[in-house]
Amino acid sequence: MTLSAEEFIRRFLLHVLPRGFHRIRYYGFLGNRFRQEKLARCRQLLGMALPQVPPKQSADLDYHDRHEELTGTSLRICPICRRGHMVVVELLKPLRTPAITDTS
């Protein structure tokens, strides 16, 4: 579907809440209590196939192995020379904490 810029902005702004309002994310079909059942019913009504569940083996891998499985690049090999293995020598603490800003 192709929309004019004005129509796109109009449709987009229908989702923007007025100042002082807060979106409630724990209500409706995405609420935690029955989320799986409601999403399954939505998929059924839309005629969608059930999502494929990844095998349990990938959940047991640490993030290095998962990154290598997904991207084909290893986090354990030096990105510069591609021969040496990366070893954590020291973790540096931040020099300062990030400032918390009030958005209201």
Image (cartoon, rainbow, N blue to C red):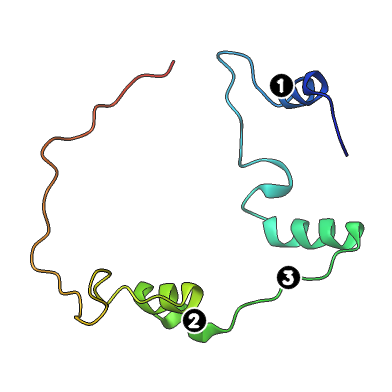
Asked if residue 48 is positioned above or below residue 27 in the image, the reply reads below
Q: In the rendered view of the protein, which quadrant contains the C terminus?
A: top left
Indicate which disc, 3 or 2, sits on the residue closer to the N terminus.
3
The amino acid at mark 1 is Leu
Please indicate whether residue 66 sits to the left or right of residue 93 in the image. Answer: right
Vertical arrangement, residue 91 with respect to residue 2, above or below? below
Q: Secondary structure at mark 3?
A: loop
Circles 2 and 1, Cβ within 8 Å, touching? The answer is no
**Occupied quadrant, residue 61:** bottom left
Which residue is the site of mark 3? Answer: 51
Quadrant of the frame with the N terminus: top right
Relative to 43, 85 lies left or right: left
The reply to whether discs 3 and 2 touch (Cβ–Cβ < 8 Å) is no
Residue receiving disc 1: 13
Residue shown at 39% from the left, 79% from the top? 65
Element class at badge 2: helix
Instruction: From the image, tell me which residue sits under label 2.
Output: 58
